Amino acid sequence: MPEESPEAAKTYFDLQAEWGMTKHVGVLEATQELAVECHVSTDSYVLVVGCGVGITPCYLAKQHGCRVVGVDLSQRMVDRSNERAKKKGVQDLVEFRQADAQELPFENSLFDAVMCESVNAFIPDRRKAAREYVRVVKPGGYVGLNECVWVEPPLPGMADYMWRMMGAEFFPSHEGWKALLEECGLSEVIERIHTVNVLSQWYDETRQLGPREIAAAYLSFPLQCIRNPAGRRFMREALRVPRSLFKVFKYFGYGLYVGIKPGKPADVS
Ligand SMILES: C[S@@+](CC[C@H](N)C(=O)[O-])C[C@H]1O[C@@H](n2cnc3c(N)ncnc32)[C@H](O)[C@@H]1O
């Protein structure tokens, strides 16, 4: 893989922060399933790592009435998330902080659940990050990931395109994510693999953000590509599409991986 990929990831996320739009495969349906598997309820205290523009933390707070902390490497994403929380009226339940998944600024055993959606493929040391998730979750608490997976070995050009465009590197097979959580000390790790199609992914993203935000994101995209040198570079790379990419959704999907931190939950009575 070429060396410039971490820079590609930074450019990709800087642009997304400007568009006001971040995403994960499976959209809201995947978030709901992950929250169920992580046993999120009104009483939960949840950490969402790599929260992007804050869609999932605000959704969890609104839907379950639980307290949520969202962290992201990018301060611009944190600002976007705070704006969203105010707009959604959940600012009393959610809090956002700038932080690196590989060094979380929280004490041990603080959260009932840690959730991460489409983040770990972009992290240089994902073992270190996964150990952090396990450290900050309570014994008996849940760590849940939604990560992109190859449901079939990718055709030539597909994996390279993801790397060039976004700096994302996926395990060559979906078992990698499950093994990662097990190696980091979680037990009873479940895995659910889903495929998606391009139209339903696009339709669900549009529905989730709503017409106003989608229109603002779609207008901002060409502007960024014109005004911003990084945006122009991104666009040039994006247009170097390998032929195999048109079939990518046959090979590409997402996996939900959830494990429990061993040990007895603390007595709260
Ligand atoms: C593909 S986006 C997904 C965002 C969000 N989870 C969603 O589904 O909308 C990945 C996010 O992870 C963040 N990120 C990347 N590396 C990170 C790290 N080391 N620590 C924390 N966040 C990170 C990026 O800034 C970006 O917001």
Image (cartoon, helix red, strand yellow):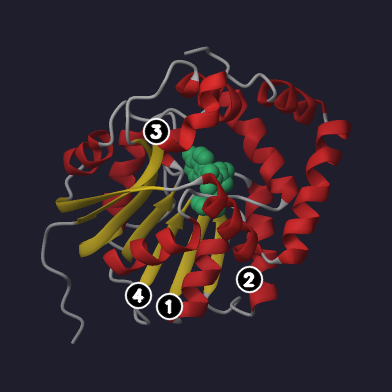
Mark 2 sits near ligand 1, with its Cβ under 8 Å away? no
Q: Position of residue 135 (x, y in %)?
A: 27, 51
> Which mark, by number, is residue 85?
2
> Which mark, by number, is residue 251?
3
Going by the numbered disc 1, the residue's amino acid type is Cys
Question: Which residue ends up furthest to the bottom in the rendered image?
Answer: 269
User: Tag 3: Cα neighbours inside 10 Å, few (<14), some, or many (≥20)?
Assistant: some
Going 66% across and 19% down the picture, which residue do you hit?
240
201, 119: nearer the viewer? 201
Q: Is residue 8 above or below residue 144?
A: above
The quarter of the picture where residue 226 lies is top right
- Which element type, helix, strand or loop, lies under badge 1? loop
Q: Is residue 6 above or below residue 208?
A: above
Q: Is 224 left or right of 193, judged from the image as shown?
A: right
Q: CA distance from mark 1 to mark 2?
A: 13 Å
Q: Is residue 68 above or below residue 241?
A: below
Q: Of callouts 4 and 3, which one flags the residue occurring earlier in the amino acid sequence?
A: 4
Q: Position of residue 90 (x, y in %)?
A: 59, 78
